[in-house]
Image: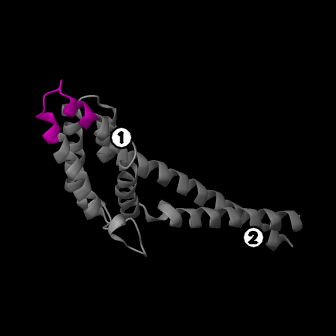
Amino acid sequence: MDGMKLLGIIMMVIGVVLIIRQLVCAISVGYHYEQEIGYNWALADKSSTIAAKEEHIAKFVSAIESKRDKFADYNAIFLKTPDNCLSNNLVALKTLADRLHDISKMDETSFAYQTAIQQITAQEQGEASELISVIRGCYVLSTSTLVWSWIGLVVTIFCLVLMFAGGIFIAIFC
């Protein structure tokens, strides 16, 4: 009976250690992404002038391209599609940068300029969230696979099951 109780304790300890590891890795990879790359997108989104948006998005694109080795080609392991491809999403991001560059040449008092700003803001807040999600996912998949998407979920569930089973062993064999 002592062996089963010891097994339960070992299972719980391993589960707790692995859960802590998952948490530390998730926080770390998120922090590094934001510090190295993502902050430019956030600043572009917060900026109210086209010039500032253009500058931050150009820096965002440049950061992705200069750190290309830290990105997976797809935000997927199986079922790779053009939509979850980093290169395709980078092309789409560059079209946004080009559009901002074109808008920056317009007269700021014109109706066309005001309409363009509204469209850019709507695109950044709505449609671009999926684009950014793919880019971030490619980064997480490449730098810390065990916390990426469904793999992170499976690992976390495994840790919880291990802890729960350890708890049952301890309760039964006490």
Q: Position of residue 120 (x, y in %)?
A: 29, 40
Residue occupied by mark 2? 7
Query: In front: mark 1 or mark 2?
Result: 1
Quadrant in the rendering for residue 86: bottom left
Q: Main secondary structure of the magenta part?
A: helix
Check the image and report above or below for 2 versus 147: below
Check the image and report above or below for 87 versus 99: below
Q: Is residue 80 magenta?
A: no
Quadrant in the rendering for residue 171: bottom right
**Secondary structure beneath disc 1?**
helix
Quadrant in the rendering for residue 81: bottom left
Work out which residue is located at the far bottom of the displayed protein and give it: 78
Residues rendered magenta in the picture: 101-117
Q: Quadrant of the C terminus?
A: bottom right
User: What residue sits 40% from the left and 58% below the top?
Assistant: 137
User: What residue sits 67% from the left and 60% below the top?
Assistant: 13
Work out which residue is located at the far top of the displayed protein and give it: 109
The dot on residue 122 is: 1
Q: Position of residue 107 (x, y in %)?
A: 13, 28
In primary-sequence order, the first of circles 1 and 2 is 2
> Label 1: few (<14), some or many (≥20) within 10 Å?
few
Q: Nearer the viewer, residue 79 or 18?
A: 79
User: What residue sits 18% from the left and 32% below the top?
Assistant: 51
User: What residue sits 37% from the left and 50% below the top?
Assistant: 127
Q: Is residue 139 visible?
A: yes
Q: Position of residue 164 (x, y in %)?
A: 75, 63
The amino acid type of the residue labelled 1 equals: Ala
Work out which residue is located at the far left of the displayed protein and give it: 105
Q: Quadrant of the N terminus?
A: bottom right
Q: Nearer the viewer, residue 145 or 98?
A: 98
Q: Nearer the viewer, residue 4 or 24?
A: 24
Q: Is residue 67 visible?
A: no
